[in-house]
Structures are given as C-alpha cells and as structure tokens.
Amino acid sequence: MKLKTAVKYMNAQASNLNSAVLQTEVQSFSIDSRETRAGEVFFALSQPDYKNNCFNGEFADSHQFIAEAFEKGVVACVARPDKFEEHKAVLEQFADRLIFVDDAILALQNLARGVYLEWNKSVVAITGSAGKTTAKELTAHVLQYSGRKILRNIKNYNNGLGHPLTVLNLAKDKSFDAAVLEMGMSSPSNEIARLCRITPPDVAVELNVLPVHVEHLGSIENVAKAKAELIEGMKPRGTAVLNADDARVLAMRELHRGDTITFGIENKADVRASEIEMKRFGETRFILNVPNGKAEVFFRLSGRHNVSNALAAAAVGYKFGMTARRIADALSSIEPPAQRGEVLHFQENFTVINDSYNSNPPALLEMVETLVDGGKTAQRLIVVAGEMLELGENEKEIHVETGAKLASSGIDFLIGIRGLAKDLVEGAKANNLRETEFFNSSDEAGEFLVNQIKMGDLVLVKGSRGVKTEKVIEKLTEKYRLEQ
C-alpha cells in the first residue's frame, strides 16, 4: 500500500509531507515503538486518544518515542497537532514525515476500514461473555479445513486497537479468503458497534450472555444490549448464528432481517450435539447434527461449554457450504488452545486442566461441572482458583456465593489464590468443604500443590491472566513429566 492511500483512508492532514514519501510502499503499521521496524508507519498514541475511545487508565504519550521510531527506519509517523506543538523542539526536524490527525486511534480504525473495503470478502465476527477465543480458534480451524485461507486475531486482539491492527494485515496480504474476528467489550461505550463499523460482519456469532463486566455495565440486561450490537452491526442481509440454549441470545433474532442459524445442546436448534460422551479429559465424543446430515465427532476439548463452542463453529462451517462429515473431521483434528481447557496428562498418573487465561463465576462453575462429570474415576478432584476480577461492588459476596456452590459441586479440595479468593475459600468452608487452602500468590500455591498431588488426582487450574495461575502449571511441569 502506498502511503498516500493510507493518508486518504485516515482522513489525515498531510500537506506538509515530502512528495517522495507519499509514494513509499508501506509494509505494515505499529503502535508500539519497541516493536517498530523499518518500512512501517508508527502511530503515536496519547492520553487524549485513549480517553476519546473509552480506554480506561493512564497511558504514556508515544510522541516522545517518534524520534526513536525514525531511527529504526519507519516511513512516517501519525501524530496529533497539539502534541507536535508540545514536543516541537524534538519533532520539528521530522515535520515532512509526520501525518497529522485529531485522534490517532480513530485514524487507525479508519485506515483499517479502508483496507477492509478494498479487500471486500467475508467477515465472521464472534462475541460472548465466555468462550470467544476458543470459538474463534475452532471456527477458523473449521474454515481452514475446507481449504480457505483465514485471517484471525492473534492473542486477544479483540478491542479498538487489536481489531484494526489485525485487519491491517490485509494491507500486505490480500489473499485471505475470509476473516474470523473475535469482538470484545467491557464498558458501556458501544465497543462492539465501533468494531462493526470497521468490518461489518457477514456472519455474526453470539455465544452467551453472562454476568461479566457488570462492574462497568450495571446489569446483565445491559451486557445483553452491548453484545447485541454485533447483530445490529451486521450487513443488512447478514446471517446471525445464535445459541438456542441462552434465552437472551436467542431473543436477538428479532434484531435483524437476515438469516438465522441456531445451535444448541439442550434446546431445539439447527445445529445440535447428541449422544455426548466423555471418556476421560480431552476425549469427548458426540454426534453432530446439521440440516444437511450428521456425523460422529471425536473432540479433544472437554466440557459441554466447549461442545457448544464447537457447535458455533460447525454452524459457520455449514453456512459456508461444508457437509456434516467435513465439519466433523475438522473438529476431530483440533488440538486444545494453550491455557484454555488444555488437558495435561502426567506420567505420574494424574491429570491437570490448565484454564489459566480468564475466569468469572459462571465460567468457573461450568469448568468445575466438567471436572466433576469427567472425574468419576479420579481419586480426588482438586480446584485451584484465582480471584475473579471486574465483578463490581458485590465482588466479595459473589466470591462467597461461588465458594458455597463449589462446596456442593462434588469437589474434594479447593485452593484459592490471591485477594478475593480468600472469600471464595471462606464460602466453601462455611458450606462444609473440608479441605481448603488459601495463598497470596500463584507461586506459593504451586509450591504447595507439587508436594500434595497424588496418583489419580484430577486438578483444575482456573484463573485470570492478572493472577498468573499459569505459574502453578510451571511448578508442576518442573517436577513431574508430561505424557508424550
């Protein structure tokens, strides 16, 4: 892409730019000066940009890194006029290579929209309170299995910065056949609607509505409204893929005029799973039923919630013309994503489920239900749970209530990690769970567990990234050997 095209898409002011620079081919785009490379355009973000786009917190002014970016060989930098004046003593020497915009994040998003429109192929967008990343990976895998080249978010690039950066990969490689994009939200600022304006979905997948981010949104009804922005932001004749087992999701079929494909386990749906059987963790069998046939799936992820994620992916595959057999083969070839229900079988004859990426009460209880369902032959069922974040003003009571539910779930041992997890443990103890421990850090919990774990144990490690429960896994793998 020539720089002059990028300037046009950004609606930027660039009359000061060197004419030769405008003709330069841009390789890629960056917002982190530490990772900026030669041939890129660097976006200097600052606090006003973050505030305008509803990012919480205090952020560094990246205009102070523009000189460093030019030293690394960038083609040009995107800057705010007011910040240029503030840093003029340093930046004036680069004036003929600066692109001026009033809002650098909006400029990044406008650029991504221009690149998307130029590409103009199918977008599958996925949202939900839990399971987004897993469903995104499953969906991308299913479509790739059909021979398509698929663009997808890396990591959890699902917000107003990560989403446009993902889309901008199309500027250097237009050969992708479709994009599977996870869209997230955490505040009442129309985040998903903004993302849909960049890439209006052809297919919109709604997984679930759970009481997550209520600290910022106020109620589960508000969470549902925020998630529904995905359906409202679809192309006029787009297809909604809706979870029939979630009443709030199913109600979203009234928000659009295009086609709807439903998926589910408990309720009647277009795409269903029947005869679900879990032999041991990481080995689930079910029959996939789609409108054009049915086929058996041998699935390496555990739990009904992951079967539901697989059905969402299957519904997208069906929409793209795949047969039941082809979809089933694709699902059967999937390996579990790291830290999202990843099953680790150890040679010392115990099993650990590593779910260290995120946690909230419904997701924790769902995983514990999976643990209990699949652990009938285990000697002990052990749950290692980090404190849960962003639960609002009732966070203490929610932890106590969740602990009480864990006590009656059938587990044998609860280990809480950090802060509010102490209330989780207290709630379990008050409801007669005999074996409990609390630790202030994941390192301490890991040290304890490696000396307590026994042959035949089945362990769930569940926590948000901020709690770093993956350190418990690291302690176990340092001392014990994984099956090959």
Image: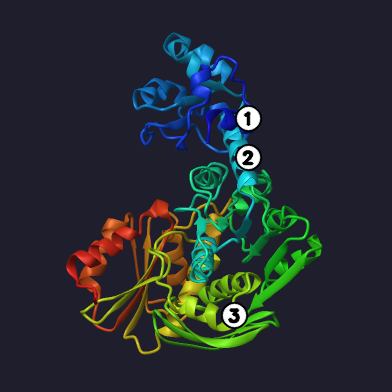
Would you place residue 297 above or below residue 147 in this image?
Answer: below
Q: Are there few (<14), some (14-19), or many (20+) residues within 10 Å of tag 3?
A: many
Front in this rendered view, residue 122 or 247:
122
Q: Which mark is residue 344?
A: none
Q: CA distance from mark 1 to mark 2?
A: 9 Å
Front in this rendered view, residue 221 or 235:
235
Q: Which mark is residue 8?
A: 1
Residue 8 falls in which quadrant of the image?
top right
Q: Residue at x 63, y 87 (%)?
A: 293
Is residue 198 toward the left or the right of residue 280 in the image? right
Q: Which mark is residue 114?
A: 2
Relative image position of residue 275 (x, y in whole percent): 55, 91
Would you place residue 232 above or below residue 148 in this image?
Answer: above
Whether the residues at callouts 1 and 2 have beta carbons within 8 Å, the answer is yes
Relative image position of residue 204 (x, y in whole percent): 66, 61
Say which amino acid is labelled 3.
Thr
Relative image position of residue 310 (x, y in whole percent): 54, 74
Q: Residue at x 52, y 71 (%)?
A: 146
Of the image marks 1 and 2, the number of the one nearer the N terminus: 1
Say what secondary structure mark 2 lies in.
Answer: helix
Of the image marks 2 and 3, the number of the one nearer the N terminus: 2
Residue placed under numbered mark 3 in the picture: 323
Say what secondary structure mark 3 lies in.
Answer: loop
Would you place residue 304 above or below residue 12 in this image?
Answer: below
Query: Does any portion of residue 348 appear in the rendered image?
Result: yes
Say which amino acid is labelled 2.
Gly
Of the image marks 3 and 1, the number of the one nearer the N terminus: 1
Front in this rendered view, residue 359 or 298:
298
Front in this rendered view, residue 367 or 173:
173
Say what secondary structure mark 1 lies in.
Answer: helix
